[in-house]
Image (spheres, helix red, strand yellow):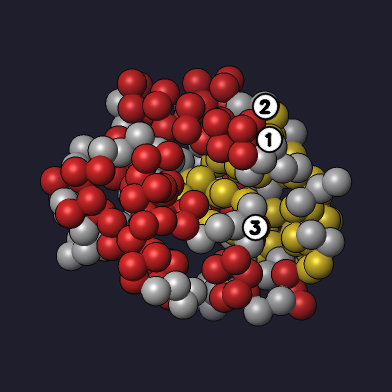
């Protein structure tokens, strides 16, 4: 059964100067335990698709269904907190918080007590192969690959079933890219996450279970 479904979705950007259709009647389904790569040249619609699946906006036409329920009938903030976590190319860590505090942040927002959140943060660090000694360091003290692991741990802290990754290896060298991809694959194959990656990187697509190619707002 699909955990996430894109049903006849179109999306149009409108401004006072122009109208541009970014997605054209796109239909897709995604299952738990699988790694998907969404590829295509710049302007193909893949980032727009990711933002709709992340609940950052609603389709102009059609619907996004999570667990059979349309995001149009949900509180989108609640959806983003509990259903779909996003991992960004630029990491988006909070620079004045320690590594542990960055990972704890979504748990504390959800009402978890600091002591429990700290314990969970340390466990998540271990899951993404970050040494415990990094807990009190700040993001700027870590390499790009290490910061991306922190970003993954923070996404896992949200306890969603869906992980959406926007060019997660775009700022990393090949060795770190392989490490991050292994973590994402393990999360899908061993812990039953649905992992959806937007990427330009052919090696990421090659390592995925399913490749979705887009062009001019449509599935190729």
Q: Earlier in the sequence, mark 2 or mark 1?
A: 1
User: Is 154 left, or right, of 213 in this rendering?
Assistant: left
Residue 15, compared with residue 138, is above or below; it is: below
Res. 84 image quadrant? bottom right
* Image marks 2 and 1: residues in contact by CB distance under 8 Å: yes
* Image marks 2 and 3: residues in contact by CB distance under 8 Å: no
* Foreground residue among 128 and 90: 128
Task: Tell me if I can see residue 2 in this picture.
Answer: yes
Q: Which mark is residue 209?
A: 2
* Foreground residue among 157 and 213: 157
Provide the residue designation for mark 3. Answer: 53
Q: Position of residue 111 (x, y in %)?
A: 46, 77
User: Is 214 left, or right, of 204 in this rendering?
Assistant: right
Res. 109 image quadrant? bottom left
Provide the residue designation for mark 1. Answer: 34
The residue drawn where x is 63% and y is 43% is 193
Q: Position of residue 102 (x, y in %)?
A: 31, 60
Q: Earlier in the sequence, mark 3 or mark 1?
A: 1
Q: Earlier in the sequence, mark 2 or mark 3?
A: 3
């Amino acid at each position: 059964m699909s955990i996430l479904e894109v049903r006849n979705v179109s999306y149009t950007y409108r401004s006072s100067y122009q109208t541009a259709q970014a997605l054209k009647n796109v239909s897709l389904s995604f299952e738990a335990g699988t790694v998907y790569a969404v590829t295509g040249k710049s302007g193909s619609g893949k980032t727009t698709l990711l933002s709709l699946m992340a609940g950052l906006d609603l389709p102009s036409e059609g619907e996004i269904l999570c667990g059979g329920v349309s995001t149009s009938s949900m509180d989108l903030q609640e959806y983003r907190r509990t259903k779909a976590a996003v991992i960004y190319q630029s990491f988006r860590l909070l620079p004045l918080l320690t590594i542990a505090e960055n990972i704890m942040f979504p748990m504390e927002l959800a009402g978890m007590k600091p002591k429990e959140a700290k314990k969970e943060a340390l466990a998540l660090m271990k899951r993404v192969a970050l040494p415990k000694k990094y807990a009190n360091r700040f993001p700027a003290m870590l390499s790009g690959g290490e910061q991306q692991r922190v970003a993954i741990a923070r996404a896992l802290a949200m306890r969603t079933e869906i992980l959406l990754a926007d060019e997660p290896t775009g700022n990393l060298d090949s060795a770190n890219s392989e490490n991050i991809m292994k973590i994402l694959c393990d999360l899908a194959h061993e812990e039953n996450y649905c992992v959806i990656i937007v990427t330009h990187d052919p090696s990421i697509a090659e390592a995925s279970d399913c490749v979705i190619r887009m062009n001019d707002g449509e599935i190729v």
